[in-house]
Amino acid sequence: MAPKVFITGATGYIGGDALFQLVKNHPDYEVACLVRNSQRGVLVASQYSKIRLVYGSLDDEEALEKEAREADIVLSCASADHEGSIKAFVRGLSAHSPDRPGYLIHTSGTGILCWQDLERKTYGEAATKIYDDWDGVQELTSLPDFAPHRNVDKLVLAAAQTENASPLRTAIVCPPTIYGNGRGSGSQRSIQMPDLTKCILQEKKGFQVGAGKTFWNHVHVNDLSDCYLKLVEAAVAGGGSATWGAEGYYLVENGTHVWGDMSKVVALEAHKQGLIPSAEIISKTPDEVDRLRQYASILWGANSRGSAIRARKLLGWAPKGKSIEAETPQLVTDEAKSLGLIQGHADDVAG
């Protein structure tokens, strides 16, 4: 019998690319996707004719519980903060029998690692703390309750069962700055780098938050999807070489950047393309950047730094996507097109 996978966020950036990777490698899997409405359903159906569509939202807990009860694996990619959907998945997957356990693979985010900067209200300054998901996994699973995404992380961890006779096994995937164009049927755009680029183009000047010294990890969206794929494959294999439950916490990164440096890279490319008058970088306060984009002081001004050891060691995960710098020229062009600063192909054709 083909494995049954239920996915949320299928028309989103993360879930859409994960779905693409899953179907590409395992067209035989029985996949069902949660979609909000018929417009989104058409997007998925046009790319994947065999996928079963489940219409609803994360608030439709009865439907989510039913899908989780019938699925072998739930891949939660829609929200890092929605408690009700996770509770529904836990109820549904817990109905499985120990000889056919259900697997929940949930997407968190390394905004959770920004908690110290948020507590101290320090933005733009470098921090030395580097988390890791191997020797330091217990630290990751016991962060302060006020840390972003911690509310849902706690629900997943509380439901986690490590015993072989458990009907439910869980894993948390915690990605940092994600970059690169997605391959899904809906959104193919990330958040942090595209929004930074958009704001620089709108302001017509490069800027950084404070001193611009904060660190953050990054991962190409295709490499993130490969990690999901490997965890799904491990679940299909009865758990495989992956760890689940209390130690099933996976950071996913392929390097570290400094946000001030990223601002310089974007401004230099934007100037090169003739979109801003100079590549000069100015400093803005947290309040000033928050007026440009909600939570910008955190997105570009807080520290979030860790080492993804577990996926590399246990799953053989080996990221191979383009570097974040190599993706910047196309990113600047794409954002300029979306703002109407340069013409796209459709505009050229229309004359």
Image (cartoon, rainbow, N blue to C red):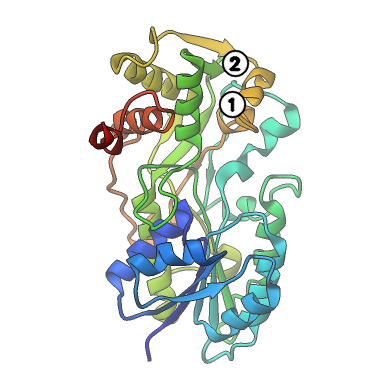
Q: CA distance from mark 1 to mark 2?
A: 8 Å
Q: Is residue 156 visible?
A: yes
Identify which residue is drawn at 35% across, 62% down: 20
Which residue type does callout 2 highlight?
Answer: Gly
Q: Of 136 and 317, which appears nearest the observer?
A: 317
Label 1 or label 2, whichever comes before in sequence order:
2
Q: Do the numbered discs 1 and 2 sit on residues whose CB atoms are within 8 Å?
A: yes
> In this view, which residue lies farthest toward the front?
351
Query: Where residue 88 sits in the image (x, y, percent)?
Result: 68, 74
Question: What's the residue type where badge 1 is placed?
Answer: Gly
In the displayed structure image, the side of residue 7 where residue 116 appears, left or right: right
Label 2: which residue? 210
Q: Quadrant of the N terminus?
A: bottom left
Residue 189 falls in which quadrant of the image?
top left
Q: Residue at x 69, y 73 (%)?
A: 61
Q: Residue at x 40, y 60 (%)?
A: 18
- Residue 139's x, y, as percent? 63, 50
On the rendered structure, is 167 left or right of 83? Answer: left
Front-most of 289 and 118?
289
Tell me if I can see residue 241 in this picture. Answer: no
Query: For the view shown, which residue lies furthest in the left direction?
Result: 349
**Judging from the image, what secondary structure is the residue with disc 1 in?**
loop
In the rendered view, would you say 255 is above or below 313?
above
Quadrant in the picture for residue 104: bottom right
What residue is pinned by disc 1? 301
Residue 202 got which mark? none
Q: What residue appears at the point 40 percent right and 53 percent down from the top-left corner?
A: 224
Q: In front: 1, or 154? A: 1
How far across and down, in percent of the image, does residue 227 sit? 39, 59
